[in-house]
Image (spheres, coloured by chain):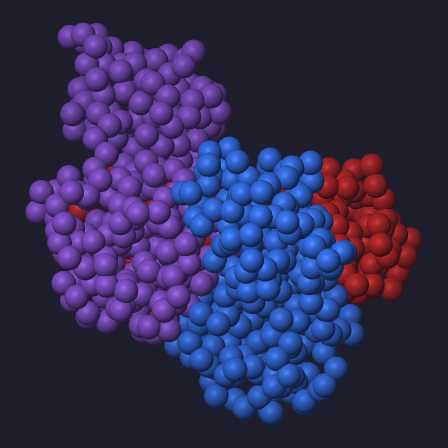
Chain colours: A purple, B blue, C red
């Protein structure tokens, strides 16, 4: 049993350390692993994407605490989700939309203050609610003791490319990674045809018709469409930043035309 | 028994990894947890604040290694402090002022090279002195074997608001967090009256008379005084940075007038 | 047995978390320690330097996974190196040049897909090859089962200062640390004479003739040569950034003249 953390807390404050202190005080033997704390502040869609990319790689039974929580202290509900023998804990604001797409997932409203810290601040539920609940769950407290089942968690509709005409779609940039690769929302499965059929992808003022199987096969200085590790097609520039070249950001449109 | 680390080393160098290697070589089973390594370089007051915000959330027996050490290699003393069954290790430069405010805290000068690495550099006592001492302490070496008691560690005077007149104080910005919230040195306990009595707080060219119980209750675009999780009043802007709006930095003055 | 990670992945993506998930899924009890993930993107020499500075401080038997891998997905080989009872895993691109300088080091080409993830992406071999192999090695799978011995790994020639005349050398900046110290490639061992013999070191438009034993002995505002913890001479500015003052970057020349 391990706990992962994914937040927009950054690493310059004491926030992440404090979460780990709270967990260690309740469940000293449970290992805690950071996924990332550098989600852009308040960016729920980026957090949802990053969680979706990583959670399946952890062992069954892992407890994923994910916190991007602009509504902290308001009436938004704290949640516990069970899906494919993984657990997710965090605010009810769409952050878990990918996981909730599985109709077998079970959702609970965390409403048992017995398993929270005694004093609840209005601004740091990570410390006061989410971390203690995760630690108690790691200590084998049953989900049913932590909250009651609900059926109406917030689900953000999946961001799929829109078909404009028989051969044209408009998609979007889901995420920009460290290397400036633009991760698109064109899935490799649905758009498998890009591997061997001529296409044209428009990214801002730039356009590419190049497919490359790896970064190393992408000609220097040319924008390429690459089958990234995310399961989505990615727009890349060999050893340089496609994001900087194109000026695109998450949410920017990407028009695809198949020949 | 666990060890926490709080430094201004940043994460781009090998420094933090090397500390963990040294600890693992001496005490392989002791878990090591990062509080933060992004304290602004040389900023002792920020490190003191961040340590004070987090250490109590860790289990009793935890060893906190805190290093912001512009005087490394000079005659400044390496310290071991015991307080409320927690241990703190680091340089004698005011970093532990909050913990030393407790008159029952015991302070030792780490002066037993037997528990240091064999070669002591003049610039990296984290690796050569603080990490090995923490690891030996985790291995149950007694504090009395690691150093001799002293009574004159450096204590920076507490930074409290100054009363200017019967209804006016001048305080300061203690810290700016990831979200651009300005953490003031007005404690919620001493200034509890802000919850229900009219007030006016001046922050640079801006002024606010608004109290909000949570970020979510703060009107869009308006500076609000919020009871943050720090125990101090915080100046916040809903989903935006109060620090950017006001241009204030740690140390900037904040004038409070009660109506 | 522990695993360390050193990459240019940054901390804003899910990449590091995903590596840790893969490792935990194969070898749940093995602790994983970050050296750094903030190596500048694609910078193999910086990664080689940072690995060289840290690996010896870890316990014997440690497995170091180091990934800066612009050639991922091409025909560059994945490697496993054994040296002084440490293991290194990563791409064959010069990243391990320091460790390979030891003629007793053994090098294997990781060519046994049995110990990889079932689906291999073309862009994230950290997740698909290096992390699983490290976890299997931690589980006591023998190196000989993971790959076959080779003798021709890529070795970047050591970057040593060049002698221009009897008393003049031209060296370079190896690395710039968090504090803006310029780590040179003048080793303290070879150039021990700087401690007590007049010298002049030219750094861009600046020049210094000052030696200081510690940061605290460096006069405010003056560039000093300091015996840093790296084993190399460092150019420092007390409580300020020598990199900012001089405008130098890794690779910039540094001319040394002995009097």
Q: Pick whichever, B248 or B228, lies toward us.
A: B228
Quadrant where the N terminus of chain C sits is bottom left
Q: Is residue B92 above or below residue B106?
A: above
Question: Residue A215 appears in which quarter of the rendering?
Answer: top left
Q: Pick whichever, C196 or B80, lies toward us.
A: B80
Which residue lies most toward the left here? A104
Q: Is residue C141 above or below residue B150?
A: above
Residue A34: percent from left, percent from top:
37, 55
Count of numbered labels shown in the rendering: 0
- x 32%, y 17%: residue: A254
Q: Pick whichever, B68 or C210, lies toward us.
A: B68
Question: Residue B49 appears in which quarter of the rendering?
Answer: bottom right
Q: Is residue A197 visible?
A: no
- x 72%, y 86%: residue: B151
Q: Is residue B201 visible?
A: yes
- x 76%, y 56%: residue: B165
Residue B209: percent from left, percent from top:
58, 42
Q: Pick whichever, A184 or A64, lies toward us.
A: A64
The answer to whether C26 appears left or right of B199 in the picture is left
Residue A256: percent from left, percent from top:
27, 14
The answer to whether B161 appears left or right of C20 in the picture is right
Residue A237: percent from left, percent from top:
42, 25
The answer to whether C69 appears left or right of C216 in the picture is left
- x 21%, y 17%: residue: A162
């Amino acid at each position: 049993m391990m706990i992962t953390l994914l937040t927009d807390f950054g690493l310059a404050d004491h926030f992440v350390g404090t979460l780990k202190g709270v967990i260690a005080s309740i469940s000293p033997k449970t290992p805690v692993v950071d996924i990332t704390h550098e989600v852009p502040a308040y960016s729920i869609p980026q957090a949802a994407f990053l969680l979706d990319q990583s959670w399946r790689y952890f062992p069954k039974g892992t407890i994923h605490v994910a916190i991007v929580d602009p509504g902290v202290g308001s009436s938004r509900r704290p949640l516990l989700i069970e899906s494919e023998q993984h657990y997710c804990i965090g605010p009810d604001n769409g952050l878990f939309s990918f996981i909730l797409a599985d109709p077998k997932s079970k959702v609970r409203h965390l409403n048992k203050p017995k398993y929270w810290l005694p004093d609840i601040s209005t601004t740091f539920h990570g410390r006061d609610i989410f971390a203690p609940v995760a630690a108690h769950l790691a200590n084998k407290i049953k989900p049913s003791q932590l909250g009651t089942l609900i059926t109406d968690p917030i689900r953000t509709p999946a961001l799929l490319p829109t078909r404009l005409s028989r051969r044209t779609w408009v998609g979007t940039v889901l995420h920009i990674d460290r290397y400036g690769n633009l991760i698109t929302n064109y899935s490799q499965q649905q758009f498998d045809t890009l591997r061997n059929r001529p296409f044209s992808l428009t990214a801002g003022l730039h356009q590419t018709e190049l497919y490359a199987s790896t970064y190393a096969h992408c000609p220097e200085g040319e924008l390429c469409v690459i089958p990234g590790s995310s399961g989505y097609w990615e727009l890349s520039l060999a050893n340089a930043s496609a994001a900087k070249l194109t000026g695109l950001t998450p949410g920017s449109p990407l028009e695809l035309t198949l020949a």
